Amino acid sequence: MVNVLRSFGLVISFVLLSLSFSANAVELKVPKLKKSAGGANINDAKLRFTKIFFKSSLDYLEAQYHLFNAMEMNDEASRTKKSIDFVKDDKKKEGKRLTNAFTTVSDNSSAIEVALTKEKVISAEGKVHYAKALPHAVSGALGTIQLPPEAKSLLDTIKADKMAALKLMDFVKVLPEIPNYVKSVSTVTKLIVTGAKTRGVEGADDANSALGSL
């Protein structure tokens, strides 16, 4: 009986030793995964950039829509309205919304700059549309000037992660162009506000004050 108990004890000890060894082996083979600092930084940086970008670009697109109506540029107004709807649709891919907003704002800015330089007189109805554009133009421009440091931070973070660069190709295309984008928006916004004053549009003085030293 004693021998049986002793044998049983040896078996139990062997099993426990085997389990302990197996657990240690698993621990050695599968080390604990550390939280990816790069991944977290990319998510945070992308969130900061997109929050400012989409709000400011939608504001500016709204201003451009009203300005095209003010100058009776109906085709441009229609295209801008479609772009606004697309950018607002969060079911669309974020990168596609980003490039759509960026391209539309940029193209519209060039068209508006030319139109405001050429067209000096607008109708009474046009002045109403122009007045609607002013607060959106100011808000969009003030938001846009916050973009460069966020764009640089996001781009630097993406460059440090090759997988992120592949996943965020639309961002990689747009981010280096943000300084020129901001410069264009700032220039055109000043022209919009100046044009409002020379055309006797209501709210021009308030818009000028709100812009400050932009």
Image: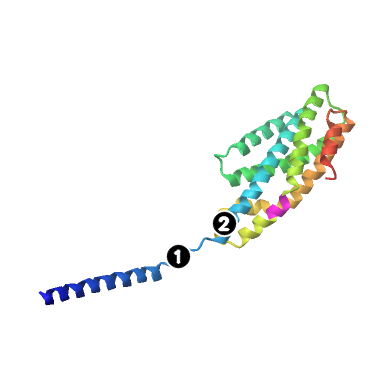
45 lies above or below 57: below
State the image quarter where residue 196 is shown.
Answer: top right
Residue shown at the point (79%, 37%) measured from the top left: 112
Please identify the dominant SS of the magenta region: helix
Nearest the viewer among 147 and 72 is 147
State the image quarter where residue 202 is shown.
Answer: top right
For this view, does 90 lie left or right of residue 197? Answer: left
Magenta stretch: give its range.
147-151
Residue assigned mark 2: 40
Tell me where residue 19 appears, x and y as whole percent.
29, 69
Label disc, if present, on residue 32 of the rendered structure: 1
Badge 1: how crowded within 10 Å, few (<14), some, or many (20+)? few
For this view, does 167 lie left or right of residue 114? Answer: left
128 lies above or below 84: above
Tell me where residue 51 appears, x and y as whole percent.
65, 45
Q: Quadrant of the C terminus?
A: top right
Nearest the viewer among 30 and 116 is 30
- Tell me if residue 74 is in the magenta stretch: no
Residue shown at the point (61%, 53%) measured from the top left: 44
For the view shown, which residue lies furthest in the right direction?
198
Label disc, if present, on residue 102 of the rendered structure: none
Tell me where residue 206 appears, x and y as whole percent.
84, 33
| Disc nearer the start of the sequence (1/2) | 1
Asked whether the residues under the numbered discs 1 and 2 touch, taking CB atoms below 8 Å apart as contact, a structural biologist would say no
For the view shown, which residue lies furthest in the front direction?
2
Q: Exactly how many numbered labels are in the figure?
A: 2
Measure the alpha-carbon separation of dots 1 and 2: 17 Å
